[in-house]
Every structure is written in C-alpha cells, then in structure tokens.
Amino acid sequence: MRSPVASGSRRFQLILLKPSHYDDDGYVIRWWRAMIPSNSLAALFGIAADCAEREILGPGVGIDIKVIDETNTRVHIPELLALLKQHGNFGMVALVGVQSNQYPRALDIARPFRAAGIPVSMGGFHVSGCLSMLDGKAVELDACREMGISMFAGEAEGRLDKVLQDAAYGELEPVYNFMNDLPGIGGTPVPFLPKKNVEHTLGLSSSFDAGRGCPYQCSFCTIINVQGRKSRFRSTDDIEKLVRMNWAQGIHKFFITDDNFARNKHWEAIFDRLIELKERHGIPLGLMIQVDTLCHKIPNFIEKAKRAGVTRVFIGLENVNPDNLTAAKKNQNKITEYRKMLLAWKAQGIMTLAGYILGFPSDTPETIRRDIKIIQHELPLDVIEFFVLTPLPGSEDHQTLWRKGIPMDTDLNTYDVEHVCTAHEKMSRQEWESIYHEAWSLYYSPEHVKTLLRRAVASGLPLASLVKVLVSFATTVPLEKVHPLQSGVLRLKHPSERRPGLPQQHPLVFWPQFVWETVAKHVSLAGSILRMSATAFLIKRNPASKNYMDQALTPVDDGEEEKLELFTKTAGGTAAVTHVRKIAQLTHANHQA
C-alpha cells in the first residue's frame, strides 16, 4: 500500500458538504431548521464512516468526518480552512449531491479551498447527468477542470476508498466516471447521519433509499439517466439496521427517497419488517414515501403502508391532461385511475401530496386555471406542489434542446424547477412565470383550504398535521419567494453569503433590513397560522363535519366518466376513457369466449 502524504499522528479531515443555492436576491438559501433531510449526505456519511472503520488510508491513520448541509448550517470557510491547516492540509472537501441549481454555489464554495491547495471533489446529479447525457464538457463542467476540482460521476458504494486514498496521496484524478458501472446497494453501508446533524431538520427526521433506479422513461426526469433504468435494492436486514441505528439516537421519522417505492420488488418484505419493528418492538415509525399513480392496484400495498407507519405519500401526478403526459413519455399515469388511487389512500387516513408540472406543450394560463379547478372539485388530493417544467441537465428534455441548439437559460442557479429556463410555444416567459405564482394562490385559496380541512375531518386525517403542511405550502412562495420544498423555519442570511459579482451590502444596511423583513414575514405568517387554526378548530367542532361529502370524496361509479370534467374537458381525457372502455369490452369478450 502507498503511504499517505501526511501520516503519523495527523488525521485525515473529510468535509462532506451539501451546498444550497442562491435566491433571487443572490443570498444563500439557509434556515434555522430546513424541511428536507439530505439523503446524499446520509449515504456518503455511512460509506465514509465505514472507510474510517476499515482504516483504508493505512493502519493508524484516522479519518475525521465533518458533515455540513448548507440549507441549515452556515459554511464558515475561514474556520474550515483553519481546521485543515491545523492538520497540515491533510484532508479534502467533498461537495455532495450537487444538483444543477446548486452547481454555481458549489463552485463558489470550492474556489477558496482550491486556492489554498485543498483537494476538492464534486459529485451529484449535475456532474453525473452531464457526463451521462452530454459531451462531457457542456453546462460549465470545464469550470471544474479549470479550478482543479475532481468530478465524481455515479455512486460511491465501493468507490469512495480509492477517492480518499488518492486525495491522501496527492493523486486525486480529474474525473471518476462510474456511470456505466452502477453498484449494487444490498449489504453496503447504510445511510446514516449523527443526531447533531439531523436536529437541524424539521420534525427531527432523517432519510434513506431502499432502492435506486426507475424503469420508466419520463423525458423531464434525470433519475433514469443518473441512477439508471435497472432497479437495485437494499435488503430488509439493511433497512432494519438503519432504523435501529437511528432509533438508538432517538430518531424514528424517515423520508424514503426511492423515486417510486411501489416498484421496489421487496416492498412487502420491507413493510413487514417495519411493521414488526413498529408493532412488536415499539419503534414509533413515521414515514413519507413516493409512489406512482397505479400503486393502489398492488394488493395490500396501501394497507401495509399504513401499518408500517406511512403518514404521508408523495404521488407523481404531474398533470391531469393525458396529452401532456404523453408528450413527457409518462404514459404510466392513467387519469382514469387517479380518483380510485387517491380515495384508497384517503380511506387509510394518509395525507396525499402530489407533484404537478406547469409548462407542458398543451398548457396555457387558461388551461392551467381550468385544470386546477377540476382538481379542487373532483380529486380528493390534500396538497399540491407546483413545479415549472425545466430542462434539467441530465434529462432527455435538456439533451434534445441542447442538440438542437435551442436557447436555454445560461445561469444554472435558475434550474430549481420554479424558474422558467426556456421558451414555450403557447406562453411568453412572463405568462409562464405569472401562472406558476398564481397557481399557488388558486389552489390554496381560503375557500379551498376550508374544503381540504372538511375532507380531512370526514376521512380521519390528522388535522393538526395537515394544518402545518397547508400553512407552509400556502405561504412560502408569496412570503419567502422560494418553493416550499426549499423552505424551513426562520430564514437565515449573512452579508458575506451573497453571490460573487453582486453588490455587497454594508452591515449597517443589511442587518436592519434583514430584521425588518423577518419580523414582517413572521407577523404575516402568524396571521395565516391563526386564521387556518381557527378555521380547523371550528370545522372539527361541527358535528356535521364527520359526514361531509363532496364530489371528490364520492366513491367511484361506472357513469362518472361521462359527467366529470376530469374526463370531458380535454381530448386526451375523452380518449383515455374510450381506451379504458375498449379494453374492458375486449376483456369481457375474452372471458365469455
């Protein structure tokens, strides 16, 4: 084995850093408590801790691991440089899970470390997606080469040893490309974060992936081109191990980050193990999972999800117009199944959240307003997360536009699925941006919020939990001007964290303005919380609320295809109904034969 450049009593300093990105004013988006835990950090920490335990840098050479999620922790670069200097610069900075919108911030973080001669590596969806789908130089990857940042494409299981050894020996390679050799994840170190890091998230929740990869072909998606089309899974023993490791430090809430847990072939064995941990071993599990729109067709899936501790489910609804779904190659979504699927979750008292994309080819401001109204009246959906259709680097959409030379926004910071990044055939940029912001106020109108609360009482959904989510999704965009998934509690800023190239405000100007903005936003937020809480209280106290019924909650019947606007307002909806009836007739005829 080669000898590290520095050894003896010195310890290798590994800094795992998940960057945030800049808001519209150029300040890093950071919170006292962020909403979503970073599974990339959890996965890398688990792998790195295993490397340290195995002494992969040589006998007696320790590895100290520092974890920083910039969405909830300030990146104090002078302190980190001082830490590294104390150890003779024996260490490296690993920029983890960097998405395209985080890439500019990641480069800004890396710059002072590279100037000090510190090895820096960058991995995540941006690097992996660009190396997978483009020519290896597109979308600013040359910035890494020019700065001497090592790019890591693919997944780190079984590969981190070499990267750490190369960094310790002063031989870090420019590119580590494992995109054509994705590893199995069963039996590998499980995702894990120390409690001191998890405490910076809302609800003290962590995350893990039970599987990776997706068989579908959605053109806007980067997952299929980064994690592959072939699914890979953790074992039930892996899942139990990570749950017990977290429970030992008092953590029992998890976001299972699989893009579609319903397609995990081990879903039942995993649920059975979680049910055992919950019902026999007393671990009070609280889970959020992501599924597709056909999960209700899997026998026992929803019922076992409830027993395993699932309280929230995110559904990739994407759109209610089949023409738009076809254009995005998301033909697995059948609008004729939407109501059945949502009512099945509703029957278990589980909160439903759905992603909804604005900007498909057939979309106009008028059709978007119409479709939101249809959703409100006919689908028993609790929460909608609106997104702008974005040609993310690593997706087929981006590759197609790039190959055709169609202009896209050159500032990667805007590729956060809430900014418009390219042209639309039927909407101007201003119209597209305006309808995105309007969509939030349309869906979360005071009247519809009352309807959602009434449905919650009638279906046994925990009202307090729903109120918290509704407050966040109804207020974050207008108050904080960021997507709710990028939100948290108490926005934090520092004048030194403004994007390079923008004017740096004097502290005597910055701090009074920041304090005033914070107070004003929280006064408005408090008003929203009080109003919604009062509404929820009155609805819950009303005896009639338990018997509330509307079109969305009405059980599915055979004749609804002819009367619901979900099926009659678009040509695609009518065609979908016709197709389902034709299949039913053929099936019936075959049975008779």
Image (cartoon, rainbow, N blue to C red):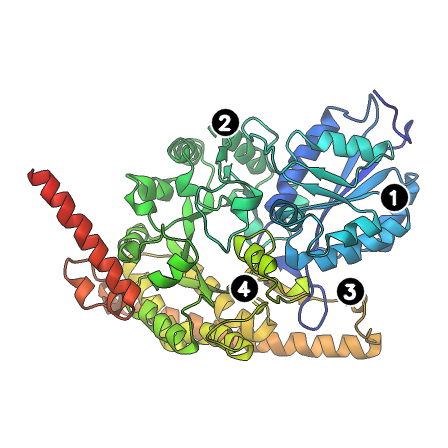
Relative to 498, does residue 164 appear above or below in the rendering? above
Q: Earlier in the sequence, mark 1 or mark 3?
A: 1
Percent x, y for residue 162?
75, 30
Give the labeled residue for mark 1: 84
Which quarter of the rendering shows the C terminus?
top left
Give the amino acid type for the residue marked by disc 2 in the picture.
Answer: Asp
Q: Marks 4 and 1, Cα distance to the nearest angstrom? A: 36 Å
Image quadrant where residue 433 sits: bottom right
Locate residue 439, reporting x and y percent: 45, 73
Give the SS element for disc 3. Answer: helix
Residue assigned mark 4: 484
Instruction: Give the CA distance from mark 2 to mark 3.
Output: 43 Å
Q: Is residue 280 above or below residue 37?
A: above
Measure the alpha-carbon separation of dots 4 and 2. Answer: 34 Å
Tell me the element at label 1.
Answer: helix
Q: Nearer the viewer, residue 547 or 264?
A: 264
Q: Is residue 85 above or below residue 25?
A: above
Q: Earlier in the sequence, mark 4 or mark 1?
A: 1
- Residue 533 pos. (x, y %): 43, 70
